[in-house]
Image (cartoon, rainbow, N blue to C red):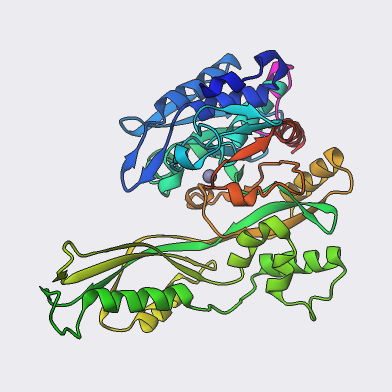
Amino acid sequence: MTAHEHDQPDELLDATAIIARDLIRFDTTNWGEGRANSETEAAEYMAAHLRALELQPELIDSEPGRTSVVARVEGADRSKPALVVHGHLDVVPADPAEWTVDPFAGVIRDGMLWGRGAVDMKNMDAMIITALQEIIGSGRRPARDLVIAFFADEEAGGVLGSGHLVKHRPELFAGATEAISEVGGYSITLDGQRAYLLQTGEKSLVWAKLIARGRAAHGSRLVEDNAVTRLAEAVAKLGRQQWPIRLTATTDRLLHEVARLLGADPQEVGPDELAIATGTAAGFIRATLRTTTNPTVLSAGYKHNVIPERAEALIDIRTLPDGEDEALAQIREIVGDDIEVQVLHRDIGLETPFEGPLVDAVTSTLQRHDPGAQVLPYLLSGGTDNKALATLGIKGYGFAPLKLPPELDFPGMFHGVDERVPLDALTFGRQVLTDLLLSY
Ligand SMILES: [Zn+2]
């Protein structure tokens, strides 16, 4: 049975769903560490849609096959600073054996679009294109100039996508001061009330390698200086470390708003408890109250009866904005002097105040489409291409608007199994985005 048997005829599908489905069918898997499928076909597909709107997209290859697309849209008021509206074309790997459906078939089932990228972030890529189709196709213009960008390589830190472009082609973003993109704008349900999380900041990241060194020896010997044992101790300490809660302006505001909506007293209910009350978003939000140090990869040894001289572990460290150096110093103390800590990659954190004309426009647009909706700021535990754009002074927000049913664990599907998005949420998202771009 092929997955395509589940297709609905295109005429029954909304334009946004069709484009998101088409994008899922390009397998743009990015495994990281230099291994990735090409984004070129997906980029060509997006460029064709942009050209159909009489725009002039530019395709930029950082390396053969690693293609990003950028196009500029003239706004009604050209004196306003430009807004970057961006998405990424790559996705993380998906193991078909774990999925209910083929992750790259773009299956429509139970009123939802399923597939790798349905959540992160081919949904928003499709919303961006179809919002432009609504605006330009009806002879209108966005309120201000837009820089539309679809980046390669976001899932490996963006070095070959947004990172490449801000470094080598900064003129593409000339005049832009703000950006909107992924991992924000979706709704959660708090005590029966729908609230949308506008992402106004991102934690910093440090990807570190721990190295324990010892002396290679026969596995039968009495050895006190075993590299594997010492590494395992360090890994366990970091993995179990209870990092203290520290609120930033964003998380403080978020928790106050959550407490207000729940009718709770933030003096009485602790930050973790308030975060847990956000339901499906708690996994993201609890991680933004503190540093996290998650061991993710272990490697050591090559033979059952040989003690290796070296053992290594990768630790994914996420600190609050500007907390990288302090956390690294503490990590070195926790693991001790005989473990080497190598920093393989690090990137800045971001935090933007939850105020100003863009925040007002997002709030009023959402409330027009979903009367009574609350809009709350939140800090992202992960990172996005907004980090690269920040190096050009562009303030980035996560706003890919989706009105979701309360029972759907949307945050849990980022990089998860059975990624899926309701079809009506895609339509809602396009309509909100269209209105925002017309009015802001
Ligand atoms: Zn993403």
Is 401 situated above or below 146? below
Residue at the location (64% across, 70% down)?
Answer: 248
Whether 231 is drawn above or below 376: the answer is below
Q: Does residue 396 appear anywhere in the picture?
A: no
- Residue 142 painted magenta: yes
Which residue does the image show at 52% across and 71% down from the upper left?
291
Query: What is the quadrant of the C terminus in the image?
Result: top right
In reply to whether residue 332 is colored magenta, the answer given is: no
Q: Position of residue 69 (x, y in %)?
A: 47, 30
Query: Does the magenta stretch mainly form a helix, a strand or a loop?
Result: loop
Q: How many marks?
A: 0
- Examine the rendered structure and indicate whether residue 228 appears above or below residue 178: below
Camera-side residue of 173 and 1: 1
Q: Nearer the viewer, residue 180 or 117?
A: 117
Picture quadrant of residue 272: bottom right
The relative height of residue 268 versus residue 431 in the rendered view (above or below) is below
Image location of residue 309, percent across then percent down: 15, 72
Q: Which region of the structure is painted magenta?
A: 135-145
Q: With 312 as the anchor, is 135 left or right in this view? A: right
Q: Position of residue 366 (x, y in %)?
A: 80, 43
Location of residue 308 by image quarter? bottom left
Q: Is residue 300 visible in the rendered structure shown here?
A: yes
